[in-house]
Image (cartoon, helix red, strand yellow):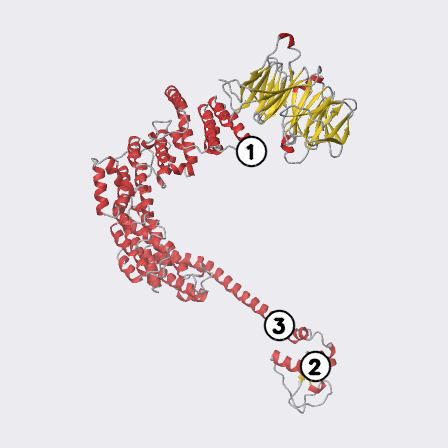
């Protein structure tokens, strides 16, 4: 079945004898509303009245009046002026006005002589004005005249000259599009200017121009191209390729109808594609109507009426030309708004998506499905193995039953194609999940996704689906997961649907598991975590096999650590810690801040799990920065117990390292309690640290030297204990260690090494004082040289430091005494001479005495350096060279 945009109806057939055929044939037609006017070759004008409704493919017209204009010359053009009930006739190179109903001539409107063409302004514009404009082309001069037509007169208001005689013209307001013998022109009536468009090479019978509406003209251009030209001279549409033998063309948006001698072709303005062909033998011309066109031959008139756009769109859809349907629907909406546009657009967009879907063009199908707002159940129902029970009752708006059966047959033959369709289904459902369409059927979408993921083995998406809030129906999804051995996912599904577990009782009332759930639901607040934990526990214990998850135990621990329900945590904590203490303790360590557990309760619970206890105490001290004495003491005791337990194992040193670090660094544990625990053990290094913490350094060193027998540890103890202390404290510790070495004959070499390694710390006199008399100088030579060198170095450094300090002091004195010092800074803008005099006579000498604090001896025979007189008063002054003088003799020359 071919697509039809227009329906053909036979409107009129002229009855005549054969001998009169050539004389009475139809030459032109005009139409207004139900009135049709025929201009014949024998100078006759006939009025026909069309019925308001059609019956089949024929219309029974009613004959009106007939007017004979003369004995010869055909009627060339007919135009109606509905505003004044005028019918304008171009006959015998003149325009005559008749009454459009009676066809009587209008005497007040005299003939306009010598007219080759004429055109009346568009009737849609006429109703907006009180006058009608008519354009005529003179048959004698190369000129176009503009007439104003009234009820009883018409007059020329303007003339526009042309270079060539026009052969066709069309009017749009103040713009004329004129075809001459070899070119097309645009003329502006208001300004008289013209613009050449392009040349053509057609004969006179093939040149035409017609109005395309909205300031646009359609021209028969060169190379058989239909050219759309705006009245501004530009083209906004691509040209249309049409046949060579085109007699006429008309625009009936959104179509272009082109007339050829035998057929009429219909093209789309929207996509320039050929849409329909109508056979019309002997057709001569076209005339536009409000709902289509009239086509006439020498004897017949046919009406081509535009079908309603909804019918056209649906016809294209039935022909699976959905892309064209979408283009048509979007194109006509602006000019011819459809009441059902949105719904129709969505349906067609979805159908277009189905076309791509069946062709396995899945990316285009997904885009169109989403754009058209396709109900996800439309796709789900095509997969009987995926849909849940509710989709079976879904009533589809789109008829795709036959295609669905074809898909079933394809999938049975080609499993690879089925896989592609399933992947697309998952991709589409993920895209619409959470949207308005998806939320309307969220249960069906989630159930379909779960079944789909299980079927495809997509464990990552499957786990992600059930781990977050979802609308999966347990009665449909639980059997699917059990059938595919997805027990870990089943537990996650129970976890997200704890409040719906009792719904299973309706579907499986005989299942023992449901009875257990019902019991827990009625007797405990922790029914929700109970069931999904039990499922996971069975996987860990080996009761269920699930190859998709390798660390179910770790997931259980993480889930318990995040649970708000503390009862559930205590319920499964025993099983968790019994499996692996070092991992299970994370249920207490990894808890979020908003779900804490009482620390004392946790410590009491962990009493029977020593390794977990130790890790939890480390968390409290190192992560939570606890300063409670009981926590630090318990951690130290836990380290002791762990170290004693691992005496024969390889990781003993790691535990002892942590214990020693805690004993050195912690300020909060009870030293006496820890010492009581380890004093009778072999943890000698730790015992020494505790003795050092209470100030028993000598005893601590005794333990390290004689019990631990670790001389390096003893020396390291001295360095560690003397941190943040002065050098004397470290020297004392090392002297104590040296004395311990000297008391044992076996440790002579150790004592010698201690002296040589720490020569910069020991002083020679303190060492010599405690050394045995039997030691020779040669034995001590290395130590003595290093010690004396260090002593000399220290003394020289002290002397140098003293000298530097004195230099610094003198610099400050010069700054204090000099006239260019800080006094000058404050009085720089005063008279320099006054400042110097004031400083010298009143402040300089006493200030020098006070500053230097030097003693001067004044004898009876001592004379003033300036005046050479004796000193009679105790006051005196001294210059920079140490010479004494009277205070009154002080002056610039004396300094």
**Quadrant of the image occupied by residue 399:** top left
Residue named by callout 1: 334
Q: State how far apart marks 1 and 2 are (Cα).
A: 103 Å
Residue named by callout 3: 812
Q: Nearer the viewer, residue 851 or 356?
A: 356
Q: Nearer the viewer, residue 701 or 174?
A: 174
Q: Position of residue 602 (x, y in %)?
A: 28, 53
Residue named by callout 2: 838
What SS does tag 1 mark?
loop
Q: Position of residue 624 (x, y in %)?
A: 37, 55
Q: State how far apart marks 1 and 3 are (Cα).
A: 95 Å
Q: Position of residue 104 (x, y in %)?
A: 66, 24
Mark nearer the viewer, 1 or 3: 1
Q: Position of residue 819 (x, y in %)?
A: 69, 75
Q: State how far apart marks 2 and 3 are (Cα).
A: 21 Å
Decide if residue 745 is on the left or right side of residue 162: left
Mark 1 and mark 2 lie on one chain; the one further toward the N terminus is: 1
What SS does tag 3 mark?
helix
Q: Residue at x 26, y 36 (%)?
A: 542
Question: Is 123 placed above or below 415 here?
Answer: below
**Quadrant of the image occupied by residue 23:** top right
Kindly tell me whether residue 435 is visible in this rendering. Answer: no
Q: Nearer the viewer, residue 23 or 216?
A: 23
Mark nearer the viewer, 2 or 3: 2
Q: Would you call the spot at circle 2 few (<14 residues within 10 Å), some (14-19), or many (20 or more)?
A: few
Quadrant of image for the C terminus: bottom right
Mark 2 and mark 3 lie on one chain; the one further toward the N terminus is: 3
């Amino acid at each position: 079945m071919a697509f039809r945009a227009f329906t053909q109806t036979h409107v009129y057939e002229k009855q005549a004898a054969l001998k009169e055929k050539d004389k009475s044939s139809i030459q032109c037609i005009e139409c207004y509303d139900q009135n049709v006017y025929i201009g014949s070759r024998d100078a006759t004008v006939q009025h026909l009245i069309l019925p308001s409704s059609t019956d089949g493919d024929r219309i029974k017209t009613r004959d009106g009046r007939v007017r004979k204009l003369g004995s010869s010359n055909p009627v060339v053009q007919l135009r109606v002026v509905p505003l004044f009930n005028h019918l304008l006739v171009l006959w015998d190179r003149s325009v005559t006005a008749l009454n459009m109903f009676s066809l009587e001539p209008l005497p007040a409107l005299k003939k306009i002589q010598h007219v080759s063409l004429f055109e009346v302004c568009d009737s849609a514009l006429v109703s907006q004005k009180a006058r009608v404009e008519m354009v005529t082309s003179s048959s004698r001069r190369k000129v176009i005249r503009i007439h104003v037509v009234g009820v009883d007169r018409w007059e020329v208001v303007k003339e526009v000259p042309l270079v060539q005689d026009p052969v066709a013209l069309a009017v749009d307001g103040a713009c004329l599009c004129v075809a001459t013998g070899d070119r097309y022109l645009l003329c502006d009536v208001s300004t008289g200017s013209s613009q050449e468009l392009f040349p053509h090479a057609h004969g006179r019978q093939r040149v035409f121009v017609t109005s395309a509406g909205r300031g646009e003209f359609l021209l028969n251009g060169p190379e058989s191209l239909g050219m759309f030209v705006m009245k501004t001279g530009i083209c906004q549409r691509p040209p249309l390729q049409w046949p060579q033998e085109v007699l006429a063309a008309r625009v009936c948006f959104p179509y272009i109808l082109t007339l050829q001698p035998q057929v009429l072709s219909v093209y789309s303005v929207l996509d320039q594609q050929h849409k329909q062909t109508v056979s019309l033998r002997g057709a001569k011309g076209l005339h536009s109507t409000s709902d289509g066109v009239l086509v006439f031959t020498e004897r017949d008139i046919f009406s081509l009426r535009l079908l309603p756009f909804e019918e056209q769109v649906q016809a294209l859809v039935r022909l699976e030309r959905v892309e064209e349907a979408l283009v048509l629907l979007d194109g006509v909406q602006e000019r011819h708004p459809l009441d059902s546009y949105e719904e129709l657009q969505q349906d067609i967009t979805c159908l277009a998506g189905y076309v791509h879907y069946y062709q396995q063009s899945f990316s285009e199908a997904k885009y169109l499905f989403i754009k058209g707002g396709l109900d996800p159940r439309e796709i789900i129902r095509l997969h009987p193995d995926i849909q849940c029970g509710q989709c079976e009752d879904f009533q589809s708006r789109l008829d795709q039953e036959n295609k669905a059966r074809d898909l079933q047959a394809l999938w049975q033959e080609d499993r690879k194609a089925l896989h592609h369709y399933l992947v697309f289904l998952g991709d589409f459902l993920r895209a619409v999940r959470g949207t308005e369409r998806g939320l309307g059927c969220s249960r069906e979408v989630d159930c379909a996704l779960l079944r789909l993921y299980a079927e495809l083995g997509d464990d990552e998406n499957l786990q992600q689906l059930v781990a977050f809030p979802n609308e999966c129906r347990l009665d449909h999804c639980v059997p699917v997961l059990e059938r595919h051995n997805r027990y870990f996912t089943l537990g996650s599904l129970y976890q997200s649907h704890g409040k719906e577990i009792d719904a299973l009782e309706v579907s499986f009332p005989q299942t023992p598991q449901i009875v257990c759930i019902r019991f827990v639901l009625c007797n405990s607040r922790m029914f929700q975590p109970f069931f999904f934990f039990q499922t996971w526990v069975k996987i860990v214990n080996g009761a269920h096999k699930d190859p998709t998850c390798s660390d179910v135990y770790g997931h259980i621990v993480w889930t318990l650590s995040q649970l708000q329900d503390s009862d559930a945590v205590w319920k499964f904590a025993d099983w968790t810690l019994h499996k692996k203490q070092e991992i299970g303790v994370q249920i207490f360590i990894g808890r979020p801040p908003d779900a804490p557990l009482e620390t004392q309760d946790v410590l009491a619970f962990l009493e029977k799990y020593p390794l977990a206890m130790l890790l939890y105490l480390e968390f409290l001290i190192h992560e939570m920065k606890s300063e409670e004495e009981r926590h630090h003491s318990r951690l130290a005791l836990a380290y002791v117990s762990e170290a004693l337990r691992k005496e024969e194992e390889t990781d003993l040193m790691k535990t002892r390292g942590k214990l020693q670090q805690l004993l050195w660094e912690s300020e909060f544990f009870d030293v006496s309690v820890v010492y009581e625990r380890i004093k009778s053990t072999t943890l000698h290094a730790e015992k020494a640290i505790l003795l050092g913490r209470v100030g028993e350094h000598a005893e601590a060193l005794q333990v390290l030297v004689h019990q631990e027998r670790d001389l390096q540890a003893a020396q390291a103890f001295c360095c560690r204990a003397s941190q943040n202390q002065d050098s004397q404290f470290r020297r004392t510790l090392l002297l104590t260690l040296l004395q311990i070495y000297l008391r044992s004959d076996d440790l002579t070499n150790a004592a010698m090494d201690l002296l040589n390694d720490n020569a910069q710390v020991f002083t020679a006199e303190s060492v010599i004082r405690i050394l045995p008399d039997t030691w020779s100088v040669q034995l001590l030579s290395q130590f003595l040289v290093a010690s004396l060198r260090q002593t000399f170095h220290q003394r020289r450094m002290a002397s140098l430091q003293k000298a530097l300090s004195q230099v610094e002091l003198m610099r400050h004195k010069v700054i204090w005494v000099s006239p260019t010092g800080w006094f000058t800074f404050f009085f720089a803008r005063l008279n320099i001479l006054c400042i110097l005099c004031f400083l010298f006579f009143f402040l300089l000498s006493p200030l020098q005495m006070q500053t230097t604090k030097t003693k001067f001896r004044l004898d009876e025979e001592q004379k003033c350096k300036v005046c050479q007189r004796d000193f009679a008063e105790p006051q005196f002054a001294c210059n920079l060279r140490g010479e004494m003088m009277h205070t009154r003799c002080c002056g610039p020359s004396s300094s």
